[in-house]
Image (cartoon, rainbow, N blue to C red):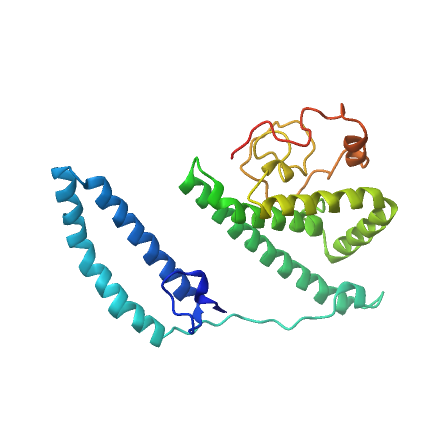
Amino acid sequence: MAASPETIDGAPKDVTLSAAQLRRLQDRKEWAAFWQIRKIEAEGKIADTFQYYAHRLVDWPATWVRENIVEPLHDRKKLLYYHRKLNRVPTIDECGVNDRTCFFEANEQYRLDKLVDSYILQILKERADRCMNYHNPYFKPCVPIIEDMEESELNFFIKYGELGSEADVRDVYMKQKHRLIWERRHPEIMAERERAYIEHKEKLAKGDFDYSFWKKGMFFQDKKNYEPPYEFFLSKSTLEADKPLSKDWDYYKKVAQDPEFDKEQGKTSAYKIF
C-alpha cells in the first residue's frame, strides 16, 4: 500500500513511496539522531570520544552496504507474497431455516473470521506491549498504539465476548440481535456513551490522553469485568469464557445519576501512567 512521503523529512515531495520505504526513511532519521546524541555526550571525554569513533568506524561500512546495495536490490527484486483469499459465503441471516449446508458454511466462515480477528488483536497488543516496554516510563509516544488496541479489543468483545468457546454463528447472530434491542430500549445510555466517546476523541486530538476512559479502577483492569480485581493481567483477551459484561445493566445510569455510586472505580483512574 502506497503512502504519502510528506510525513517523513528528507523524502521527495513528488514521489510516492511504499510503507516499507517510509519506514526505512524513518529508521534512518532515528539512527542519525542517535549518533548525534552519542557525539554530543562524548564531547570533552577522551575515552567516550574514542569509543564513539570506534563504533562509527564499525557501523559506517555496514550502513553504506545496507543503504546502497541491499535495499535497492530489495526494491527491484521483491519476493512474491501470496495471501489466500477465500470466497465469502452467505451469512447466517441469509440462510434458510432448514438449510443445513448454508448453516455449516456460515459457521465455518464465522470461525475463520474470529480466528483472523483474534490474531489482529494479538498483534495490536504485542505492539502496545513493545512500545510501552521500550519507552518506559514515558508512554506518550505509545498513545496512538494504545488507542488502536483498546478500540479493537472493545469491538472484538462486542462481537465475540460472553459467548464462550462452544458458541457458533447462531449464538453470535442472537447476541447481535439482543444488543440492538437493548440499545433501542436504553437510548439515554447510548447517548451518554456517544457523548463520552466524542469527548475522549476531542481530548485526544488536543494531546490529552486519559487511560481511565478505557481502563477503570486499577491499572490495566479490564473495564468489561466489573468485579473485584482478584487477578492482575496486562490486558485480557476476550477470546473464550468471558465473564458477564456487567452485573447491573443500569450501571452507567447509576454512575451518571449518583455521584456516590462506585466511587472506588469511578470515572478517573487512581493510577495514571502519564
| Location of residue 250 by image quarter | top right
**Residue 158 appears anywhere in the view:** yes
x, y percent for residue 157: 67, 47
Which residue is found at the position 68% from the left and 60% from the top?
110
Q: In the image, is residue 248 above or below residue 122?
A: above
Which residue is found at the position 13% from the left and 38% from the top?
47
Which residue appears farthest toward the bottom when viewing the image? Answer: 76
Which residue is found at the position 51% from the left and 70% from the top?
83
x, y percent for residue 138: 44, 37
x, y percent for residue 21: 39, 66
Q: Is residue 12 left or right of residue 73?
A: right
**Residue 248 appears anywhere in the view:** no
x, y percent for residue 256: 78, 33
> Depth check: 83 or 96 in front?
83
Q: In the image, is residue 239 above or below residue 246?
A: below
- Image label count: 0
